[in-house]
Image (cartoon, rainbow, N blue to C red):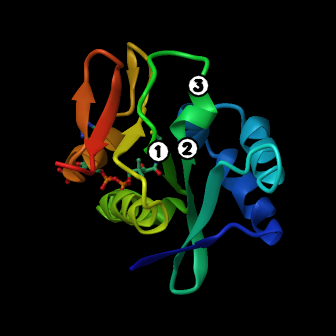
Amino acid sequence: MFVLRKFEDEDMAVMKKWLEKEYVSKWFGDASEWLYEIEHRNDEFDFIKHFIVEEKGMPVGFCQYYDWKKAFDAEGPSEPDGTYGIDYMIGEEHLLGKGLGKELVKLICDKVIEDEPNAIQLIADPTIEEERVNVTSIKVLETNGFKYNKETAVYKKQLIV
Ligand SMILES: CC(C)(COP(=O)(O)OP(=O)(O)OC[C@H]1O[C@@H](n2cnc3c(N)ncnc32)[C@H](O)[C@@H]1OP(=O)(O)O)[C@@H](O)C(=O)NCCC(=O)NCCS
């Protein structure tokens, strides 16, 4: 069973290790950008909430959520207040392909609902380019109630029906 806890400075080394793995970097891209944001999580990037995923007390992955408007206000189609973006990864390879991604996405969704009373919508973007789509990630999103939105080309989950 996965548990989330706040990202701490001591987690930087393991995060760096995960970001360098091929199956992560092909979707996460440049490690230095992620590390920079995490290093500045208490100032410039305080609108992003970073978490370590633990299993039996050991760090096995990472996830984060962020206020969509603060991250992308000037870019792309605008989204209402209360929209949060999510990102996630299983960092330890031996835990891949066991259906745990579904559990991880549920955990980060529940975390937003728990911590952000204004949350109305969640967004995930598993598409790098039109031809480079993260099929595994889409499956775990769909299992958690996310639906593809054609206009904005991202996956959305409405929290208020
Ligand atoms: C995305 C991620 C969290 C998924 O976790 P996971 O537990 O390993 O996922 P699973 O292997 O259980 O696969 C989920 C589903 O996708 C399916 N799947 C996997 N590879 C597939 C493929 N190439 N084509 C079609 N379906 C595929 C699985 O069969 C499973 O389907 P099911 O739910 O019907 O059983 C994990 O792969 C990961 O951390 N990847 C690296 C980082 C990443 O890509 N993050 C997401 C960024 S958007």
Q: Whole-percent x and y of residue 43?
A: 83, 50
Q: Secondary structure at mark 1?
A: strand
- Mark 3 within 8 Å of ligand 1, using the beta carbon: no
x then y, percent, for residue 132: 42, 20
Q: Pointer 1 and pointer 3: residues touching (CB < 8 Å)?
A: no
| Residue 41 percent location from the top left of the image | 77, 53
Quadrant assignment, res 150: top left
Residue at (80%, 56%) from the top-left corner? 42
Query: For this rendering, which residue is in front, 130 or 46?
Result: 46
Badge 3 vs badge 2, beta-carbon distance below 8 Å: no
Name which residue type carries label 2: Asp
Amino acid of disc 1: Tyr
Going from N to C along the chain, the mark reached first, 2 or 1, is 2
From the viewer's perspective, is 32 left or right of 74?
right
Of mark 3 and mark 2, the one earlier in the sequence is 2
Q: Residues within 10 Å of mark 3 (few under 14, many from 20)?
A: few
Asked if disc 2 and disc 1 are in contact, CB closer than 8 Å, the reply is yes
Q: Which residue is mark 1?
A: 84
Query: Secondary structure beneath disc 3?
Result: loop
| Amino acid at the residue labelled 3 | Asp
Residue at left offset 38%, top offset 14%: 131
Q: Which sits earlier in the primary sequence, circle 1 or circle 3?
A: 3
Q: Is residue 97 above or below residue 73?
A: below
Q: Is residue 18 left or right of residue 92?
A: right
The numbered mark at residue 60 is none
- Return the residue at label 3: 73
Residue 115 placement, left or right of 73: left
Q: Are there few (<14), some (14-19), or many (20+) residues within 10 Å of tag 1?
A: many
